[in-house]
Amino acid sequence: MNVGLIGCGFIGKKHAKSIASAHDIRLRAVCDTETDRAAELRRYYASLTQDPLEIESYQFYESLLENPQLDTIAITVPSGLHYRIAREALLRGKHVVLEKPMTLSLIEARSLIQIAETRQRKLIVCHQKRFFPHLRSIKGLMDRRGLGRVVTASLSLMYNRNDNYYNQSAWRGTWKMDGGVLLNQAIHDIDILLWLTGQPRTVQGFVERLIRPIEAEDTAAAAIVLENGTLLTIDATVCATEGTSREAVAVTGSAGAFVLEGKNLKPTYWNVPGVEEPVVSAVDPYAQLYQDVHDSIYNNCPPLVEAVEAVTALETIFAIYRSSVLEKAVTLPLNTMSTLIMKDKLQRRAAVRCQGPKVT
């Protein structure tokens, strides 16, 4: 499988490292508008592999997509560019590995899925935590109803992203190109929470920009009712004190309970009678994801993280946004929602509040 990588920043480097360690997968081209970053990533990849073939370098993604040797395109650019690049790649007959969030619009996400189905191409979204063996074991337990009737589940995320983080690039924290804590820091764990427990039905959400100098939210909370009746809560912030990094997913059922913590969501509490706590093994989830992409293409089978599943976490976040501006619970599915709609609604609400109460 020959991969072209668009976006050579921090996340792009992670992808390159994982591609180098995967079987029968090769990085064949890189692209970044900052040519120095593309050159640096080429050197980095070369240091990890004995692959003698030259890696092509491009400044503009349109030129990379014209390369006939590439069958798969990995996209690790700012989120606001995901749709445009992924759409063009699919239309040119390429398979696509797309970083989270899939897009910043529900309509655009569903459009990509439709194009991929029509063109018979694979569209994979990077929810790589699903590839941790212990989480796949827990998913099997949940599918077997090993916790009995699941009654509650929660996600709590406390991060520090200081002003320097957001000042690194003008697009960070903007509604047009990025989003806030939900779309950036919390989306992976929201994906795992829903993967384990079920499909949301009703969402009551609250989002605020309390401290950070950004357009989007730095803090969020939500209460969710799933289609199966399970009650979920989510709280997430990037306003925690310097050095704070904590993620916790807790699930309680009539026949057991567990708590998962840390970036790898390792079990820290396990009370499931008759079921041993799953062993946590050291794996590179990105490498596992790329191997799954390879196998799904060459064996013509569904990937572990199909794009249609990735929409679940995205739609839930947009439901939290919509609920927050409407100041009431919303029911899924949503017809449409995007970060730009969110920005417009917030501006309209602020304008109304500035006008004050009407005088009669």
Image (cartoon, helix red, strand yellow):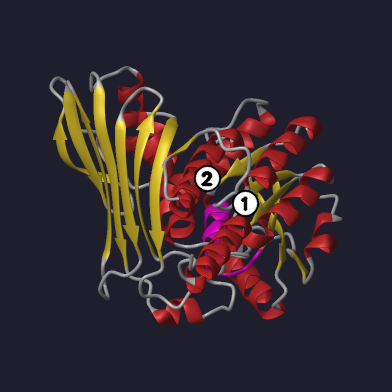
Whether residue 176 appears in magenta in the rendering, the answer is no
Is residue 1 in view?
no
Q: Is residue 128 visible?
A: yes
**Residue range (magenta):** 7-20
Which comes sooner in the sequence, label 1 or label 2?
1
**Amino acid residing under circle 2:** Leu
Residue 100 image point, x, y percent: 54, 52
How packed is label 2: few (under 14 Cα within 10 Å), some, or many (20 or more)?
many
The percent coordinates of residue 28 (x first, y second) are 72, 57
What kind of element bears circle 2? helix
In the picture, measured across the screen, residue 69 lies left or right of residue 221, that is right
Residue visible at 53% across and 42% down in the picture: 315
Magenta span: helix, strand or loop, mainly?
Answer: helix
Q: CA distance from mark 1 to mark 2?
A: 8 Å
Q: Position of residue 175 (x, y in %)?
A: 57, 64
Contact check, label 1 and label 2, Cβ < 8 Å: yes
Task: Please determine whether, in this image, residue 107 is positioned above or below residue 34.
Answer: above
The amino acid type, in three-letter code, at marker 1 is: Thr
Image height check: is 332 above or below 68? above
Looking at this view, is 331 or 72 the one in front?
331
Residue nearest the viewer, comparing 278 with 180: 180
In this rendering, position of residue 197 left or right of residue 150? right
Other residues around mark 1 within 10 Å, as few (<14) / some (14–19) / many (≥20): many
- The residue beneath circle 2 is 314
Asked whether 8 or 151 is in front, the reply is 151
> Looking at the rendering, in which quadrant would you find the N terminus?
top right
Q: Quick check: is 19 in the magenta stretch?
A: yes
Name the residue carrying label 1. Answer: 103
